[in-house]
């Protein structure tokens, strides 16, 4: 779900609301039961109703008590998320440093979800918030959580929003916001793993007979940039694939390598990067960066892909290039038979902003025209290839701002000319140069993000069905860039945290989303190797070594290549405040799992991970419809703290500010191989049940053979 519609609603309410003094010790909301009305609208509530596709009414349906409930109905002719709402605001003064206890009775019909949000709004646009959700159900269900308002003078006001997500009707009644804990209140689990007692437990159920889908082979890919010899993929001295990088990439299991880069691709002239090395000219990388000779061009990238047993996904230059250049590239790459099956038209051309992007930004109409031109020229060169267009879809809090209708336009105009949509939809938490946030809160936001990523991918599948109906089921989704991402600058105190155990757990959670999203066929982590803000391989004392998330991707690539089978989890949960690019979330389970069988069906693999940052969780795993042997093998990826890592270091000479560390138990500044370990062992399987304990911020793999 994009958080942008909620943000627009907030802005509308800022000007529409009368500010309510927040001094009462009882319910801070006016007309919380929607019994008072004027002209058919609830008094004290402002309604944001931007189009005729939505209506707000008072109705006996969905009520908990009294005569009425608030109903929000949304019936668009095209996919839409949260667009209609009602809300109240209140002054922040008496609320700073206090806890709000928020509850309400919610229900919904059809495909709708009722969403109750409470948020504290800062002067700089940042929010602290909780979000309570209830899908289609009758009678109404009580939802509740608490919002801690920081003692932050930049917080201007607090807003309570009733909104609808999806199509149908959402109902709200008997809402409550108090400063004192109501009688019978069940304490929610604390966000980020703090404040939750030891002795936690969860249950995972696996049905080995129920296949979710076959694991796509392209989900475990990587990005491979052309600069600096592929960042070490190419041995510049011996003019061959680097033996070290070849071995690491082979072991990682990444078989689909996106080339020649993200942003770099839309300035890349492939013609200057082929032929004898001595005759290759100096080539621009992107505005503001030093030009260099492309020692790692198409032929070298093909050699590296062949050496690791993989293949390339090539992003053609749609920013400064032409359809003829792209078609000629297809002919060149496939001159000795089909070597490159997957091609992508451009990178982020939808108006990201900044001096590197501004020269190549396109309108969605112009990009869609280019897609048709490029795809037809490229398929004329080789009709066997698969061609992808970029979509502007994301779970990010601000969504696709410059061109909100980008994806709809591309699908409507060029849907018949593409085979997949490429999105960059799983970067989190993106906190930039945050100077004040707790590391635990930042990690909690990152670990909650997969919930929003899943909703966003589902919404994109729906858009394909609506805007390119003739191609529904044929246009797939490729997440061509994703990964733990905090910042791009050494001025950030979180820039290096992509290498921690918390980031490894995030990677496991995102891969679960990809595997369980039916339309997602490819994914390329960004990027294979990097010295600072991304990268699954880094350098330690001059040698290339894996970062902690590398081992999670390797585990998935080696164990989840056959049928993915049904699994479910009952787990304690946490809430996370809005942080960086990530919307706030509630009800995030600490324990998640994914299960799959080997291609021959003789081995069942179950991966489990613990998002709690400080507490171990005991897990009972129940397996049905599989003739399990009496002993399972276990493999764990764990650390001495949530910020443990393998000791990789920034690029020599690059200034990086002192990095944040986890509150309480920390290992970030230890940074040696002893802080991240991978113990193996066995577990007893009795009557289909396995009991294990997962340390905090850790991943565990159960491998269960059949008898």
Image (cartoon, grey):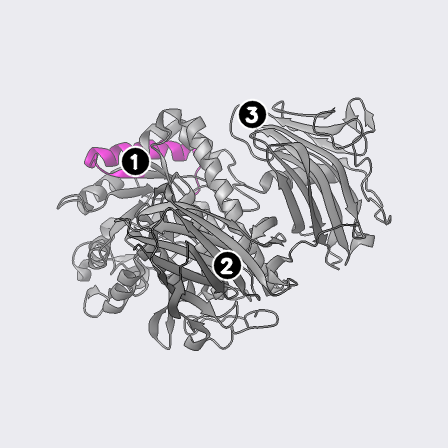
Please tell me the numbered disc located at residue 619: 2
Q: Is residue 361 magenta?
A: yes
User: Vertically, is 642 above or below 212?
Assistant: below
Label 3 near label 1: C-beta < 8 Å?
A: no
Residues in magenta, as a range: 360-387
Q: In the rendered image, which quarter contains the N terminus?
A: top right
Mark with earlier residue (2, 1): 1
Main SS, magenta residues: helix
The Cα–Cα distance between marks 3 and 2, rounded to whole angstroms, is 43 Å
Task: Give the mark toward the camera: 1 or 3.
Answer: 3
Element assignment for label 1: helix
Residue 41: image x %, image y %?
77, 26
Element assignment for label 2: strand
Task: Give the mark toward the camera: 2 or 1.
Answer: 2
Choose top left, top right, bottom left or bottom right for residue 398.
top right
Mark with earlier residue (1, 3): 3
Q: Residue at x 36, y 43 (%)?
A: 209
Q: In the rendered image, which quarter contains the C terminus?
A: bottom left
Q: Is residue 546 magenta?
A: no
User: Vertically, is 365 above or below 684?
Assistant: above
Label 2 near label 3: C-beta < 8 Å?
A: no
| Residue, disc 3 | 76
User: Vertically, is 246 above or below 64?
Assistant: below
Element assignment for label 3: loop
Q: Residues within 10 Å of mark 1 (few under 14, many from 20)?
A: many
Mark with earlier residue (3, 2): 3
Q: Residues within 10 Å of mark 2 (few under 14, many from 20)?
A: many
The Cα–Cα distance between marks 2 and 1, rounded to whole angstroms, is 52 Å
Foreground residue, 119 or 589? 589
Q: Residue at x 42, y 31 (%)?
A: 464
| Residue, disc 1 | 374
């Amino acid at each position: 779900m994009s958080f942008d519609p909620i943000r627009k609603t907030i802005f509308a309410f800022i000007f529409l609301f009368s500010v309510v003094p927040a001094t009462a010790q009882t319910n801070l909301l006016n007309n919380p039961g929607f019994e008072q009305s004027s002209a058919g609208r609830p008094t004290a509530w402002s309604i944001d109703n931007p189009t005729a596709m939505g209506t707000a009414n008072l109705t006996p349906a969905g009520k908990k008590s009294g005569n009425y409930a608030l109903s929000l109905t949304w019936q668009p002719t095209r996919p839409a998320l949260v667009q209609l709402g009602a809300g109240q605001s209140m002054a922040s003064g008496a609320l700073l440093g206090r806890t709000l206890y928020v509850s309400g009775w919610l229900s919904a019909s059809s495909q709708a979800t009722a969403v109750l949000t409470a948020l504290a709004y800062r002067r700089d646009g940042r929010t602290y918030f909780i979000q309570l959700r209830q899908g289609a159900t009758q009678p109404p269900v009580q939802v509740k959580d608490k919002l801690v308002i920081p003692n932050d003078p930049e917080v201007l006001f607090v807003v309570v929003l009733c909104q609808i997500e999806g199509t149908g009707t959402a109902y709200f009644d008997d809402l409550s916001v108090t400063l004192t804990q109501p009688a019978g209140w069940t304490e929610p689990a604390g966000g980020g793993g703090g404040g939750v007692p030891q002795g936690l437990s969860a249950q995972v159920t696996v049905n080995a007979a129920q296949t979710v889908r076959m694991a796509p082979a392209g989900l475990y890919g990587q990005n491979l940039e052309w600069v600096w010899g592929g960042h070490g993929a190419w041995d510049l001295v011996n003019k061959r694939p680097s033996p070290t990088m070849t071995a690491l990439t082979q072991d990682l299991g990444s078989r689909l390598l996106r080339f020649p880069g993200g942003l770099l691709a839309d300035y890349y002239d492939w013609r200057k990067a082929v032929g004898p090395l001595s005759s290759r000219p100096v080539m621009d990388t992107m505005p503001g960066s030093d030009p260099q000779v492309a020692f790692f061009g198409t032929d070298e990238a093909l050699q590296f892909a062949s050496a690791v047993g993989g293949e390339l996904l090539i992003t053609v230059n749609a920013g400064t290039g032409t359809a003829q250049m792209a078609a000629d590239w297809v002919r060149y790459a496939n001159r000795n038979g089909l070597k490159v099956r997957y091609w992508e038209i451009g990178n982020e051309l939808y108006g990201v902003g900044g001096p590197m992007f501004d020269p190549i930004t396109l309108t969605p109409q112009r990009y869609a025209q280019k897609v048709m031109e490029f795809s037809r020229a490229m398929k004329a060169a080789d009709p066997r290839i698969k061609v992808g267009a970029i979509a502007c879809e994301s779970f990010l809090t601000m969504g696709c701002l410059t061109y909100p209708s980008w994806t709809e336009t591309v699908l409507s105009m060029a849907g018949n000319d593409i085979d997949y949509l490429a999105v960059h939809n799983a970067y989190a938490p993106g906190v930039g140069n945050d100077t004040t946030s707790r590391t635990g809160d930042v990690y909690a936001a990152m670990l909650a993000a997969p919930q929003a990523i899943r909703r966003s991918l589902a919404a994109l599948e729906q858009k394909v069905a609506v805007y390119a109906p003739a191609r529904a089921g044929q246009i797939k989704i490729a997440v061509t860039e994703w990964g733990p991402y905090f910042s791009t600058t050494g001025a950030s105190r979180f820039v290096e945290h992509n290498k921690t155990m918390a980031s490894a757990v995030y990677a496991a959670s995102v891969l679960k989303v990809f595997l369980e999203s039916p339309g997602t066929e490819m994914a390329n982590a960004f990027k294979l190797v990097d010295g600072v803000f991304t990268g699954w391989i880094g350098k330690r004392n001059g040698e290339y070594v894996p970062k902690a998330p590398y081992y999670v991707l390797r585990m998935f690539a080696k164990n989840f290549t056959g049928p993915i089978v049904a699994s479910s989890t009952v787990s304690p949960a946490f809430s996370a405040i809005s942080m960086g690019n990530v919307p706030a979330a509630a009800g995030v389970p600490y324990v998640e799992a994914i299960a799959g069988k080997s291609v021959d069906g003789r081995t069942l693999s179950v991966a489990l991970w613990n998002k709690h940052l400080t507490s171990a969780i005991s897990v009972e795993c129940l397996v049905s419809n599989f003739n399990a042997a009496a002993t399972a093998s276990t493999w764990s990826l764990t650390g001495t703290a949530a910020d443990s890592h393998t000791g990789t270091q920034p690029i020599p000479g690059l200034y990086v500010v002192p990095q944040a560390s986890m509150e309480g138990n920390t290992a970030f500044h230890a940074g040696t191989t002893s802080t991240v370990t991978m113990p193996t062992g066995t577990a007893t399987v009795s009557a289909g049940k396995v009991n294990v304990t997962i340390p905090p911020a850790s991943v565990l793999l159960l491998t269960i053979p059949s008898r």
